[in-house]
Amino acid sequence: MKTIDHIPTNKLSRASQLVKTGVKVGGNYAKYYSKKAFDSSITRETLDDENAEDIYDGLKSLKGSALKVAQMLSMEKNILPKAYVEKFSLSQFSVPPLSAALVRKTFKKYLDKYPEDLYDTFEKDSVNAASIGQVHQATLDGKKLAVKIQYPGVADSISSDLALVKPIATRMFNLKGKDKEKYFKEVEEKLLEETDYLLEVKQSQEITKQCSVIDDLRFPKYYPELSSERIITMDWMTGVHLSEFTQVNTDKEAADKIGQALWDFYMFQMHYLKQVHADPHPGNFLVDKEHNLIAIDFGCIKKVPQEFYTPYFELAKPENINDPEIFKAKMLELEILKTSDSAEETAFFSALFHEMLSLFTKPFHLDTFDFSDESFFAQIADLSDKYSKDTQLRKMNGNRGSKHFLYINRTFFGLYNLMHDLGAKIKVNNYKNYLD
């Protein structure tokens, strides 16, 4: 794959790249409708394929938060057309890497030494390039290491990238009023945290130590002395990406074992640590030959405050969902309903969230849950489709819910998708075996 020597970092050059991408997408629409006028057999999939290709190509040259958004969107399998999901999922593994010269420059700037001065060997070509960093192999004292290097300018461009995306997101999600800023602020803060590699090393060491009690779960060791705010050195972990494993696996017992470890990992964090690995895409998990799950990349950790945790999980109980008074009280606590809502808004959003929660919390209502149940995921897809076409919803203020929903819901959607890809059947409360 061709390497890159420069990433646009200032607001003007990044905006210019997005404008070019927008022009291409506009051209795709014009071509589609002109062809459609003469050939009715041309389908929307053709337009989706071309748009996905052009949008991804535009974003991958920017890297950073722009590409991270594509990565997040690729997890929303029930929202985006298939072409977008497939193309954007490449942002997990396949983007042009930095050139060797730029890698050396980054080492000199942040560790004051070149790679050959720090390691016994260092592979100049990266083995994996993703949204905000790329990984190289190295060795030291007989140990095989993974060295993650952040792309230059990523942290500095986050605020300007989000400013460019904000008008589009505001229209897409029908956000109104001043309090919509809390959502953008939450995203900005989490993305900035992800660019702080010293914080990631600290979080990685803390969480892996506490989660080491979980069966069939493995983590790399991290080396602070060989890390900095833009470089992380950790053990090289041997395994295949979770998505690669699920594509070829036919061993149900192995899938259940891995799925149980994955579920316990997330439930242990959520209920015991009150903070969670909030980036559950397949590129952050490996499977080794013994079918152990390996968790990597602790850059995006979402702390779960008690005032959110309590009502959130109280609404996972059917008796609370189905008690109108308790349900309304929890909806107000979670900022889904507002005291200023009209009777129409209260009735509409109460009905919408009652239907959603009754479905999404099903796994918590049972002792065991089979994530290979296609009917469960078909219901989720149908519900997403229903509300994406709801004209009444488009007229309502989309500002609904605490800012904490953004990353907690993202975590559960991602987890459910990974569990479904595995087709795992798990014991829902098994994580309690690891609590003090």
Image (cartoon, helix red, strand yellow):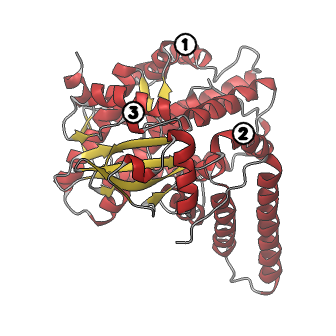
Q: Nearer the viewer, mark 1 or mark 2?
A: 2
Q: Is residue 393 visible?
A: yes
**Would residue 300 appear left or right of 155 to someone viewing this image?**
left
Q: Nearer the viewer, residue 233 or 167?
A: 233
User: Along the polypeptide, which appears first: circle 1 or circle 2?
Assistant: 1
Q: Is residue 98 visible?
A: no
Name which quarter of the figure residue 338 lies in: top right
x then y, percent, for residue 373 = 33, 51
Pointer 1: what residue?
325
Return the mark for residue 224: 3
Give the spatial CA distance, label 2 vs label 3.
49 Å
x then y, percent, for residue 317 = 40, 23
Judge the density around disc 3: few (<14), some (14-19), many (≥20) Cα neighbours within 10 Å.
some
**Would residue 401 appear left or right of 263 to someone viewing this image?**
right
- Quarter the C terminus occupies: top left
Q: Nearer the viewer, residue 398 or 49?
A: 49
Return the mark for residue 393: 2
Name the amino acid, label 2: Leu
Judge the density around disc 1: few (<14), some (14-19), many (≥20) Cα neighbours within 10 Å.
few
Name the amino acid, label 3: Pro
When the figure is inspected, residue 116 is found, relative to residue 401, above or below; the finding is below
> In the image, what residue occupies the spot 29% across and 66% down?
248
> In the image, what residue occupies the spot 45% across and 48% down?
148
User: Along the polypeptide, which appears first: circle 3 or circle 1?
Assistant: 3
Give the spatial CA distance, label 1 vs label 2.
24 Å
Name the amino acid, label 1: Glu
Q: Nearer the viewer, mark 3 or mark 1?
A: 3
